Amino acid sequence: MADEERKIITDEDWKARVQREKEETQRKAEAEKSQASGGEAESGAASQEAQGGGEGDDLFMSLLGSLVTQAMYALGMVPQQEGQQQVQVDIVTSKQLIEMLRMLRDKTQGNLTSEESGQLNEAISELQRVFVTRQQQVQEAKLRQSGVNPDDLKGPQGQ
């Protein structure tokens, strides 16, 4: 029993296991993509079981979803309350959340599956696009509140 307690597992064994798991996850993702192109994707818990993703994958996607949802709220892409007509935009918070997603992408480079990396990049791109539009809208609204017509600042058409 003393010999069993003294077993030392080297980092090389751990690295090899992680590499095998990573390759297996990539193979499953590729197989799922080919199946999804032929029919409807599954949903809910059945989909998670079919994907075979590890708990770490699920946690990463949950984190990504949480940050993206917060940014969408801050950008006014999702109404804060049902039936609310007016959109509330928080430029500072949305910028911070987008920066957090960019930092997450940079810090996890080379450690994400192709699906995770693709979703992260797609989310960042879309949020940045909406951010620029919202920032322009906020600036125009501030100009209008101060009595300046933003159209007057654009100059003559065709130049």
Image: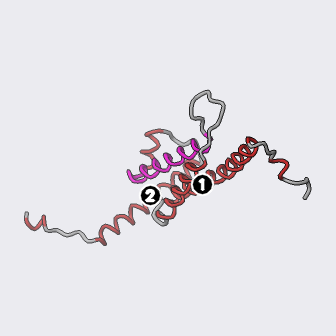
> Where does the image place residue 91, in percent across and percent down from the top left?
61, 48
Q: Main secondary structure of the magenta part?
A: helix
Residue at the extreme front: 146
> Where does the image place residue 8, in percent across and percent down from the top left?
20, 70
Nearest to viewer (mark 2 / mark 1):
1
Residue 59 part of the magenta segment: yes
Vertical placement of residue 3 versus 70, above or below: below
SS category of the residue bearing label 2: helix
Magenta highlight range:
53-77
Residue 114: image tag: none
Q: Residue at x 45, y 46 (%)?
A: 50
- Please name the amino acid that badge 1 sits on: Glu
Q: Look at the image and tell me in which quarter the C terminus lies.
A: bottom right
Q: State the separation of the CA atoms marked 2 and 1.
A: 20 Å
Residue 25: image tag: 2
Q: Residue at x 50, y 47 (%)?
A: 65
Question: Tag 1 or tag 2, which sits nearer the N-term?
Answer: 2
SS category of the residue bearing label 1: helix
Q: Residue at x 51, y 41 (%)?
A: 42
Nearest the camera: 129 or 17? 129
Residue 73 part of the magenta segment: yes
Instruction: Please give the residue where the numbered disc 1 appears in the rendered image.
Output: 122
- Please name the amino acid that badge 2 sits on: Thr
Nearest the camera: 63 or 26? 63
Vertical placement of residue 80 versus 119, above or below: above
Q: Residue at x 43, y 49 (%)?
A: 58
Task: Specify how the rendered protein is coloured.
Answer: secondary structure
